Image: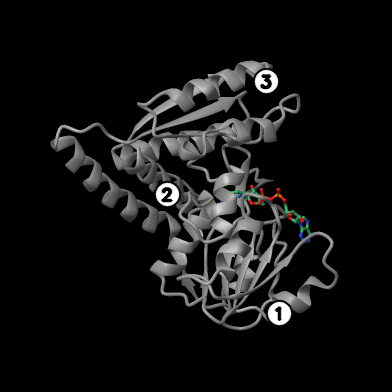
Amino acid sequence: MKIIDGKGLANQLKDELRLETDKLAKLGKRRPHLAAVLVGNNPASESYVRNKVRSCQQAGFESTLIRRPDDVAEAELLTVIEQLNSNNDIDGFIVQLPLPKHIDEQKVLLAINPDKDVDGFHPMNFGKMAQGMDAFLPATPYGILLMLEHYGIETSGKEVVVIGRSNIVGTPMSILLSRKAKLGNATVTLVHSRTKNLKIHTQNADIIIAAIGIPKFLTTNMVKDGATIIDVGINRVEDATRKSGYRLVGDVDYDGLAPKVEFMTPVPGGVGPMTVLGLMKNTMKAYLNN
Ligand code: NAD
């Protein structure tokens, strides 16, 4: 089995971005600038945003972190978004999800100027993506496409099964891989919580992308020999041997599958860092459009 080293690839691509941004700085131009809005102090969100800020530093981007407490009023959050929309020094920004229950997430995402929507969650970008138009691709599927490309994993004519139909991972991933485009042209099956006999589909797949949120959901008997496995899941499971008391695992039985598959992403160190890289690439794109 070959490990798809998302962490290593993300570092390599961030170094390439760094060369570009240093060149801009030498020419006296400003650097790309990403802002992140973080509401509350959910530990997972804190850690994701920390990684994003660190990656900005690595790639030579400016970054701004805007924090609001858990009980922030929806109207105040919308004002923050308005300010970011009209601030010409900010090329792109994200609102870290999930938001507290009293805030309408859809309303917040719709308020983001699509030209600054570097997470690629706005329906304008989603629609453009679905129609093959130029758009900010959702960061996680974008990062996955870059991994498949780098490792020379063919998608054209392949059977792909995407498990999970979220708006940010499963659904856009299925659209991107079935498009008539480079890194597309696959026959894609999207399976989800209401799929009957899911195994029938996964057993036939050349590539499986698991985005469910259930540890070790995908097991050896569900996968054919030589398949490629992309594990999007990030699940915290208790682990008394760790100082933190937990460790991160994906949605697939990594150890069980390792002898059987051709390529697989680890968790951590696979899709996670490439999602941040997707975000960095989108920010660079926003900068160049700005
Ligand atoms: P989600 O949590 O919004 O939804 C889960 C999906 O899984 C649903 O579409 C549901 O239909 C499907 N599902 C649930 N139970 C199922 C079952 N028994 N059989 C088949 N399908 C089932 O999805 P999400 O936001 O895409 O997150 C999925 C996982 O990916 C989570 O662990 C999340 O933390 C992780 N994630 C990781 C990254 C990354 O950068 N690595 C990015 C986003 C999400």
Q: Amino acid at mark 3?
A: Glu
Q: Residues within 10 Å of mark 2 (few under 14, many from 20)?
A: many
For image coordinates 48% across by 63% down, the residue present is 145
Do the CB atoms of the residues marked 1 and 2 lie less than 8 Å apart?
Answer: no
The mark found on residue 74 in the picture is 3
Q: Residues within 10 Å of mark 3 (few under 14, many from 20)?
A: some
Q: Nearer the viewer, mark 1 or mark 3?
A: 3
Considering only order in the chain, which callout, 3 or 1, is on the residue closer to the N terminus? 3
Q: Is residue 170 above or below residue 289?
A: below
Q: Amino acid at mark 1?
A: Gln
Q: Nearer the viewer, residue 193 or 181?
A: 181
Q: Is residue 161 above or below residue 213?
A: below
Q: Nearer the viewer, residue 270 or 168?
A: 168
Distance Cα–Cα, label 1 vs label 2: 31 Å
Q: Residues within 10 Å of mark 1 (few under 14, many from 20)?
A: some
Q: Is residue 82 above or below residue 212?
A: above
Mark 2, secondary structure of its residue:
helix
Look at mark 2 in the image and give the residue it sits on: 277
Considering only order in the chain, which callout, 3 or 2, is on the residue closer to the N terminus? 3
Q: Nearer the viewer, residue 280 or 90?
A: 90
Q: Position of residue 264 (x, y in %)?
A: 53, 68
Do the CB atoms of the residues marked 2 and 3 lie less than 8 Å apart?
Answer: no
Q: Position of residue 115 (x, y in %)?
A: 46, 39
Look at mark 1 in the image and give the residue it sits on: 203
Q: Nearer the viewer, mark 1 or mark 2?
A: 2
Q: Position of residue 122 (x, y in %)?
A: 58, 42
Q: Nearer the viewer, mark 2 or mark 3?
A: 3
Which image quarter: residue 54?
Answer: top left
